Image: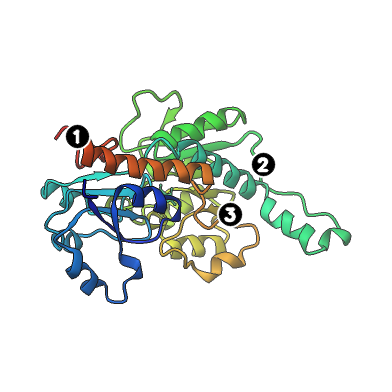
Amino acid sequence: MLKPDILMLGPIPIIASALEAHFEVHRLWEAADKADFIAGCKDKIRGIVTFGGTRTDAALIDSLPKLEIIGNFGVGYDTVDARYAATKGLVVTNTPDVLTEEVADTALGLILMTVREFGAAERHVRDGKWLKGPYPLSRGTLRGKRVGIVGYGRIGKAIATRLKAFGVSISYHNRRPAADADVHYVDTLVGLARQVDVLVSVLPGGAATRHIFNAEVFAALGPEGIFINVGRGSVVDEAALVAALKAGRLYSAGLDVYETEPCLPSELAAFGRVVLLPHVGSASQHTRGAMGQLVVDNLVNWFVRGAPLTPVTETPWPR
Ligand code: 8YV
């Protein structure tokens, strides 16, 4: 049987061989002239494989008349125009569940690193400064503190599960209260920021959440407040974040995601206690392997059985 043709928008080494076993893979990122490349294969392409670093917009969708399915490597699919794909009768899949625990672990790591300044403390050892004196006591602690989670889906709940063991008070904000939540709900983001010491964002990207962490939210979090982000960088007004840190209106931040990755405001790196990770929330071999397998399984199920495994909400299955 002929292998279905798949357009891969960027490299995802962990699934390269599994994809090639099932599909004829066309590697767009290797093409010198992308428009030319697409023109050459457009009448064969039945699937796209994409991830956060690449964009699947209406123009790309329209250029592929045989397209049936878009498989996104990642739970967040803000770089795929899923609404437009739905109007075209396409299926979009993502990789939920398999990364939940890994990203929640990352959030806890980032919270601890930021609150207790472990990044700066570690640099103190590496730079030989310990020989001259101990690292200063951290102003931050989780003892007696309140943590607010913004975005109370699977990952938000997994973060709350971990935080319970730390004995902190936990509350959350969502567009709507979560049915099965056993922690306190706050109905506005600013209201939550006002009530907590550490604010953790797990929000997805996209127009609805763009820059919702703004000067007002950082002011509400306050001069002792700590902001953590493991969702998407686009939710943060980074200029407002830098300004709040600079002016001492916010104590610190721990970030895994940025607005225009891998570029970030140079001022952020200048704050010694701010912790900056390079978008590694799900980045273990184990979890990226599981995400990759789910991308492949979705495509295989689609082409062999006519049904995706994990369609996104805009393209539900059965339709
Ligand atoms: C990955 C992520 O970094 O799942 C997501 O939404 O942000 C991460 O797991 C990303 O998918 C890889 O591009």
Q: With 282 as the anchor, is 92 left or right in this view?
A: left
* Position in image of residue 262 (x %, y %): 47, 65
Badge 1, how many Cα within 10 Å: few under 14, some, many 20+?
A: some
x and y, in percent, of residue 218 in the image: 47, 53
**Amino acid type, residue under disc 3 in the picture:** Ser
Q: How many marks?
A: 3
Mark 3 or 1 closer to N-term? Answer: 3
- Residue drawn at the location 43% of the way across and 44% of the way down: 202
Residue marked by disc 1: 317
Query: Residue 315 in the image: x percent, y percent?
Result: 19, 41
When asked about the image quadrant of residue 167, the answer is: top right
The residue carrying pointer 2 sits among few (fewer than 14), some (14 to 19) or many (20 or more) residues within 10 Å by Cα, namely few
Of circles 2 and 1, the one toward us is 1
Label 3, ligand 1: CB separation under 8 Å: no
Query: What secondary structure is found at the residue carrying circle 3?
Result: strand
Residue 293 in view, yes or no:
yes
Give the residue pinned by disc 3: 252
In the rendered image, the quadrant that contains the C terminus is top left
Q: Which mark is residue 141?
A: 2
